[in-house]
Amino acid sequence: MRRPVIPLLTALILGITVGSLVNIPDIPALAALLATIAALLFPVVAGRKGSIAFCLLISLFLLGILNINLYLHPYCGRDDITLHAGKDKLTVEGLVCNPPRVLRNKTSLVVNSTRIIRDENVIPVHGKIFLSVKDNNRLFKYGNYIRAKVKFKEPHNFNNPGGFDYKRYLLYRGIRLRGYISSPSDIVIMRESAGDYFRTRIERYRSHLRELILENAPFPEGSILRALVLGEKEGIPEDIIEGFNRAGVSHILAISGLHVGIIAFISLIIIRTIMKSSEYLLLRFNIFKVSALFAVIPIISYAFIAGLRISTIRATIMILCFLIALLAGRGRDLLNILAFAAFAILIISPASLFDISFQLSFMAVASIILITPTLGSMIPRRTGDGILRKGIISIILFMMVSLSAMIGTYPLIALYFNRVSSIALLSNLFIIPIIGFIVLPLGILFIITAPFAPIATALIQIASFFIRISVSIIDFLSSFSFSNFHVTTPTVPEIILYYLLIITALKLLDVWRSKEGGTDHTPGAVTESCFFPVAATHLGKLYRANRSRVLALFLGSILLFFTVDAFYTNIKAARQKYLEVTFIDVGQGSSTLIKFPGGVTMLVDGGGFYDRSFDLGKYVVAPYLWHEKIKKVDVMVLTHPDQDHIGGLPYIADNFKVGEVWSNGCESKNESCRKLKKIIMGKAIHHRIVDKDTEEQTIGGASIRILNPAKSVSGRGLHFPDSDYNNNGVVMKITFGNMSILLPADISESAEAELIASGSDLKADILMAPHHGARSSSSTPFLKAVRPEIVIVSCGPGNVFGFPHSDVLDRYRKAGTRVLRIDKCGAVTIQTDGEKIETENYKSTESSIRKWDS
């Protein structure tokens, strides 16, 4: 077979994917693997190529399942660190096994635990833990043996459809517990240089490089140079990263196959130039193989200097596979080499399949290999071209390579980032030559000459100059309003059909081009091989006889699907006939999405952490909205300006089209409040101040009544006590048909009493627990007035407030109310047609339908 690695890689990928989706026990999978391998020894099987191939594919499929089980379902012995999760603070000792990540206000450490100390008893343990140490601290480094007092917790997710699986992300890295250290006195370094000797020496050299850059490079150019040389992008300012994102060149900041490939290319050029200067070397050695052999040294050295991060190791393996193919004289079939590189990486690290950088890198390279030749064939060929024309053709080819990579990675970028840059092609034309072929080589020279301070300093300053030029170009290009746009999350069928569309179009162009040229560039007649049985061979012959018609029909069918899909997406919301309310999992906070009949959307609050380093709007609420194919929020409601309600709204207001904003007019010194107000004014969004006298609104047949505050609090000052913020929060009652939902924000017992005394109709079938289930809310008289059938408690797991309070849960139980806790259920969705209510819990996939009499 021409490319035998591809079916083997496919079988391995399928096994890893199935193992990640379905919990298949190790023993049955291992027994099946051994049976399949044993079948290869039987003469009946061993004598048939088809049987051998089938057994190999099944073996790799089962091997993929077993390998991914090692990450997702590891064996827990008696000394496993996870047995100590959720208990009181423990003293743990361990080795810092990765270079620390120093962020703006904390340092992240991955520690290989060795023992814990409890009541003066030493208990041996093993397993990786993830520690977040408050405040920026440069004292920690690889090889430190530390002792810390910490309470361990299992990582948890924000359980929403389309959300990032943080828990699985850590499992793929062997991390199963995390802890937070708020006091410097709770962690000490007991020994230094306790790690691997060779890697410790490398880390010392990396520290020397880091200090040279910090001392001699201006800010922010130095932070970008550190990202390119040391793989440390944490110090780059957010506005710079945003500019790179808008320009579509953020990939240049993360060390990947592009960087390692450029280093390999430059190394090959230098070594070949040196060898060409000697006639003896040219006659004595194979110039291509010797160049490939010696290029290995700078590639591996760069991987170590870059910190041996997972993405760097994968990129290094990929480029080394290409060099090995050159050495073996098999460098012509690039696609097969790429498949072999992916196969090698997934055998070593099956969890890499789910890493974004792995998917983007391999998809980009595969697209370049497959698409660029077709695009390049469109350039007219002429003889005797001058230097100017050759230069223009080189630029065109470079843009075609960039375009090929963009075409191939577009669905993945849309899936993971929901953002597409419209100027990426132009940005890459300027930035990759400057950063890739000027700054990066200067960085490599800096690594080599670091022991010689004057030379290293000069190289840093030259590199900083070119980085400054790059940042200026990016600032200019990204300043245009059309530079980028957000897209909704594509579905799996849409992604698959997109790639089928590209492959079909390429095949069809190849067929048409071969007909015009009077030649046939398609492979010869399909012959039976070890991977293709006779039936497949006959189908192949039938396809060859009608390939042009078949491809055109298939292409048309896919285009028809996308046309119908786009039309259906647009009319689906407009034709919605039921009210849908989703209580989004934002941890300890609140955010609620309401979809009214007819497609109008309302977002009530946006969650938020008091530690503003994590933007819940950007990383939790927005991805959920994009997953729901929502790009416009018709009404955004801010109940009150506490951070756990307002924190995510500025990002939503800035990145979505917002029709109008409702609030009680209350302001605060909260940074998120100031940012939201600035965005509202800058985008000229209509801001409606509401109170109980606000006229009842009707949207899609559902009525919305504002029950609180008693009057607008706008202009009453910026120094309300927390209780006033809460009790003046916007309380809404939404009624659709015979069903009602009450959203009481964070009001306490006193505000509940005022609502009862006002004579408002508080009866509701669904109640969102006031103040996340705090003891001071959900009073017995209030529950008697509301008489809810279901209560939704929006709270975070293990929150420091102890919400929901046990007394509140007891009141709900006595009232005969069904309680759905978001910390246990994940996002909760309520659907009603006005007569019956259906609930769905994301985490437990529980679904129930209940009908109420009118």
Image (cartoon, helix red, strand yellow):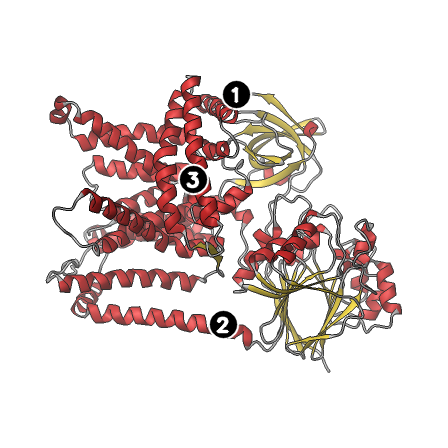
Per the image, label 1 sits on a secondary structure element best described as loop
Q: Quadrant of residue 82?
A: top right
In this view, the residue in front, 690 or 200, is 690
Disc 2 residue crowd, few under 14, some 14–19, many 20+, Cα 10 Å: few
Q: Residue at x 55, y 28 (%)?
A: 95
Q: Earlier in the sequence, mark 3 or mark 2?
A: 3
On the image, the x and y values in percent for residue 489 come to 48, 60
**Quadrant location of the C terminus?**
bottom right
The front one of 831 and 371 is 371
Residue contact at pointers 3 and 2, CB within 8 angstroms = no
Separation of disc 3 and disc 2 at Cα? 40 Å
The kind of residue on which mark 1 rests is Ser
Q: Nearer the viewer, residue 13 or 548?
A: 548
Q: Is residue 185 left or right of residue 526?
A: right
Q: Which residue is mark 3?
A: 470
In the image: residue 49, left or right of residue 236: left
Residue 778, percent from left and from top: 81, 61
State left or right for residue 842 relative to residue 810: left
Amino acid type indicated by mark 3: Ser
Residue 762 is situated, as x and y percent measured from the top left of the image, at 80, 71
Residue corresponding to mark 1: 193
Callout 2: SS: helix
Q: Pick the residue in front: 640 or 289.
A: 640
View extreme (right): residue: 757
Q: Which residue is mark 2?
A: 570
**Structural crowding at the residue carrying mark 3, measured as other residues with C-alpha within 10 Å and reported as few (<14), some (14–19) or many (≥20):** many
Tag 2: amino acid: Asn
* Residue 62 visible to the viewer: no
Q: Is residue 636 above or below residue 380?
A: below
